[in-house]
Amino acid sequence: MKILIMTACPCGMASSYLAARLLRQAAQDLGWQVNVECYSRLEPVTSFTQTQLDEAELVLVAADTLLDVSRFIGKPLYRSDIQSALNDPKAWLQQGRTQAVVQKKGESMAGVKLVAITACPTGVAHTFMCAEALTGAATAMEIQLKVETRGSVGAQHALTAADIKAADAVIIAADIEVDLSRFDGKRVYRTSTGMALKKPQYTLECAQAEARLYRHKEKSPAGTDGTCRQDDIQQDVKQAGPYRHLLTGVSFMLPMVVAGGLIIALSFVFGIEAFQQQDSLAAALMQIGGGSAFALMIPVLSGYIAYSIADRPGIAPGMIGGMLASTLGAGFLGGIIGGFLAGYSARALVQKVPMPTSLSALKPILIIPLFASLFTGLVMIYVVGGPVAWVMTTLTEFLNNMGSANAVLLGIIIGAMMCFDMGGPVNKAAYAFSVGLLASHTYGPMAAAMAAGMVPALGMGIATLLARRKFNVSEREAGKAALVLGLCFISEGAIPFAARDPLRVIPSCMLGGALTGALSMFFGARLLTPHGGIFVFFIPNAIQPLLWYGLAIAVGAIMTGVLYSVLKRSDAQLLAGK
């Protein structure tokens, strides 16, 4: 078989050159005749000759930048990111052979119009970094792209009806549920914010090639009155799983936790016990933060888990289930169970219970809230509440009374999880667990989680300062940004480094994060709010003890920075095969 291979990386240095060498050798091992066009500043580009183009039976492109493939019209062509080719060259070649698609005229991405929505659970980091990455890649690829961000401040740069109508496809880069009713009749491609952030060009290409027609269920003929029928429940392009439903609930709960925690911290300005004095300002602040905001945490969590599952019909039974979990002492675990009970029961009523069209208007305002709430409430009271309340009481007592060794071990686990995938599922699981414990007035795990979450980005920034010569210009610039992001508790600042060198970056971050988590728990640190980074340091009593907590973060970040500065291989070392 005669094949052509093209390689290219954004900096035009090591990755492209290494991929070209590895793929050439792997192709020769398979007995293929291969010619390689490598875009690297390390050697002149040798373009394919017309004879090579005519005789080629397969074209394989490993690139993270835009390459002109118009020469290959009529040839089977396979494209992917360059890291996949570097990980296993022989398997990548075989995969390219089986998945190649004949290149046709008019398939260039230039001039394509796309719209996108980005949304992450916290609405702080991934949401906006993902939008920026997609926009930058779209500009390089000559794609017209407009991105609507669903962050913590609400929707920004909202897509208009005209934007959606003109779009060739829609990208939903979200880790939580978003309303897709606007995109009825459009081609929709769904991915995570993490994937779109790490591989924006690949995401744009997949959106154009793999987007599928989305059909929102038909609305009632009298849709203007706000009623809905059985078919009105939003059906995603691909049914979301429990993990996404949980993250949706967490994302709506977070503002309550942040506001409540900070207001409680403000009440402590007048003294730790000052709120016990009736009619004082400290008592009023505690009533707002602890008596109201924190009291709404679990109902909101439960209600929006149900909303993610069943859309609006799930909100009422979900919040009722969450309130019962709170009053029964079942805590955030009970709230999660109540949310899923309410959501799936509401969705079952919507989809499975037939009703005459004349009575369909009663379904969302009477039948679903009544029966879903009854089912959820009775199960919570008679089945779930007692056992889960016992579990929460036992867990809370254990966490509040555990010895130093157990505390350090928990800190190590939370810290390592926070740094494993930097905003991915493992990170979010540790974060959600820590946030949920705030409702039980257990503040140690949250302190460990935020401290460890600051380590990856800070560590990468420190590494670029300690071993400056090992990093190229773009990496040093990314290091400066990572330092700022790390201080703001945005661990995603380390993602550019992890994507390029995961086998060295991730272990370095996990070791530093584990050390920080362990020290935070050992010092008995308590954090009243789940976000804010260094800005929380300036709010009196939001963190205790402040100096030891800052030391824990600094020690972990320095450890990560030193480790990676030692392990990091420069582009010159990579080329020399060291």
Image (spheres, rainbow, N blue to C red):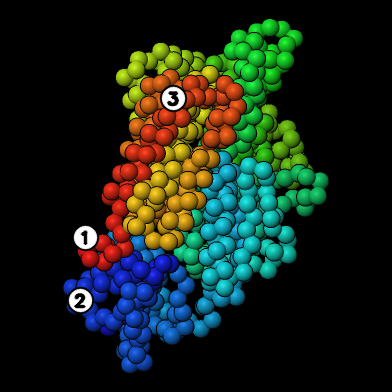
Q: Could you tell me which residue is drawn at 41 percent across and 67 percent down?
A: 11
Residue 545 visible: yes
Residue 249 to residue 444: above or below: below
Q: Position of residue 539 (x, y in %)?
A: 60, 27
- Horizontal and vertical percent for residue 518? 36, 27
The label shown at residue 578 is 1
Q: Which mark is residue 548?
A: 3
Q: Which residue is mark 2?
A: 28
> Circles 2 and 3: CB distance less than 8 Å?
no
Q: Is residue 89 above or below residue 517?
A: below
Q: Please state which amino acid type lies under the numbered disc 2.
A: Gln
Circle 2 crowding by C-alpha within 10 Å: few under 14, some 14–19, many from 20: few
In terms of sequence position, does the residue under pointer 3 or pointer 1 come before the other? 3
Measured from the top left, where is residue 446 in percent x and y? 48, 28
Dot placed on the residue nearer the N-terminal end, 2 or 3:
2
Q: CA distance from mark 2 to mark 1?
A: 23 Å
In three-dimensional space, the C-alpha distance between marks 2 and 3, rounded to whole angstroms, equals 58 Å
Closer-to-camera residue (312/390)? 390
Viewer-nearest residue: 577 or 56 = 577
Q: Tag 1, which secondary structure?
A: loop
Residue 97 is labelled as none
- Quadrant of res 399: top left
Q: Is residue 297 something that shows in the picture?
A: no
* Left or right of residue 146, residue 485 in this image: left
How many marks do you count on the picture? 3
Regarding mark 3 in the picture, which secondary structure is present there?
Answer: helix
Which residue is found at the position 26% from the left and 80% from the top?
A: 34
Split into 4 quadrants, where in the image is the N terminus? bottom left
Mark 1 surroundings within 10 Å by alpha-carbon count, few (fewer than 14), some (14 through 19), many (20 or more): few
